[in-house]
Amino acid sequence: MEQLTEIRVRTKIPESEMEQKVGKILAESDYNVRLTGPARVMLPDGKPLLIYLPRYLNGERFEQAYDVLHPIKMSGNRGLASGAPGFTVGGRRRYKSVNSAIIGNVDPLGNTPYCRTTAWTGDHAEEFSSLFPLFMDVDRAFAEYVPDRYLAQKKRANATLPEWMVGDTVFTTMTVNNTYPTGVHKDAGDLDEGFSCLTTWRRGNYSGGHLTFPEWRVSVDLKDGDLILMDAHHWHGNTALNLMSEDAERISLVLYYRTKVADCASAEEEAHKEVMAKKRSMGETRPTSAVWNGSTTALGKIPSMDIDAMNESVSTSD
């Protein structure tokens, strides 16, 4: 195990100050400490906030994963993590669509009341499987550096039908974010007693995009192959991302366990639920207008990818 510098945070910023940052892109002034080496950051109660492992992931399989992840640039509905004002459709709050995609498996969400493998995963099964060795590397780091959280997540994974787990790991789901800074948010839907694991691929020339926990004023500028294990139920987001070359790119991959996947039935039963849900939805009237960032807009004029994203909403990111 790599030797880690341990940092204990003592106080957090006032709640009134934190409220002003929610959903916003952060600035360099929003942190006091930026981690530059292997570190473990502990909360006042002794629980871990994050473990930072620079260059933990490297070598051929890490590099090959880039070729799989780079083309994944589907728009996703990221809630507060989009870093921009939202809009209302049919009484439901929606947010800017960004380059964020969910791969792996998800539990019932919104208009999809059944468990399923995401569309990209089903359409690219071989490419997805090629990522399993990398996922296992992350799984091993999780087990080594945060064993109590890992065992809690492993217990839940063991109680989940194997078809909803990703390989021989404790993860059900991954989020792929491509070159956008996330607004300040807390992750929702993943296991409270578990941990999120995040790594990055960097290409070209850019600055910023530092992953920051503003409540505790701690930040890290993730480099190529860095791995961070973190409690994503604390406020976090990125500083502004400044692209300085045409090939500038920052891919982040977040691995986690979706809590309600433990309740998923067999793949066959869930497929039957999908068929029945789609039958019930036939003939239903879709909303004809929406409030987009404060102004009423015909639904047909909202970019189609944003409408699609409404059906794939998961609030988990870096």
Image (cartoon, rainbow, N blue to C red):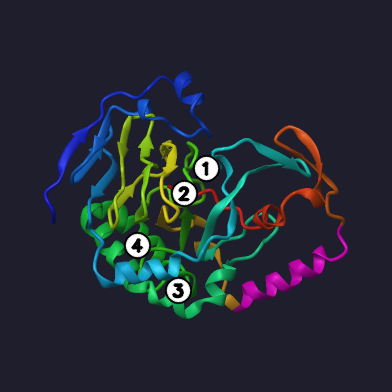
Mark 3, other Cα within 10 Å: few <14 / some 14–19 / many ≥20: some
Q: Residue at x 41, y 30 (%)?
A: 27
Of callouts 1 and 3, the N-terminal one? 1
Q: Where does label 1 land, which residue?
A: 81
Q: Are marks 1 and 3 in contact (CB under 8 Å)?
A: no
Examine the rendering and report whether any part of residue 44 can be seen: no
Badge 1 crowding class, 10 Å Cα cut-off, few under 14, some 14 to 19, many 20 or more, is many
| Numbered label attached to residue 154 | 4
- Is 98 covered by the magenta stretch? no
Residues under labels 2 and 1: Cα distance? 7 Å
Q: Which mark is residue 128?
A: 3
**Which is nearer the N-term, disc 2 or disc 1?**
1
Q: Residue at x 46, y 49 (%)?
A: 317
Query: Which residue is disc 2 drawn over?
Result: 317
* Amino acid type indicated by mark 2: Ser
Residue 64, position in %: x, y? 34, 72
Q: Circle 2 sits in a helix, a strand or a loop, which is it? A: loop
Q: Are marks 2 and 1 in contact (CB under 8 Å)?
A: yes
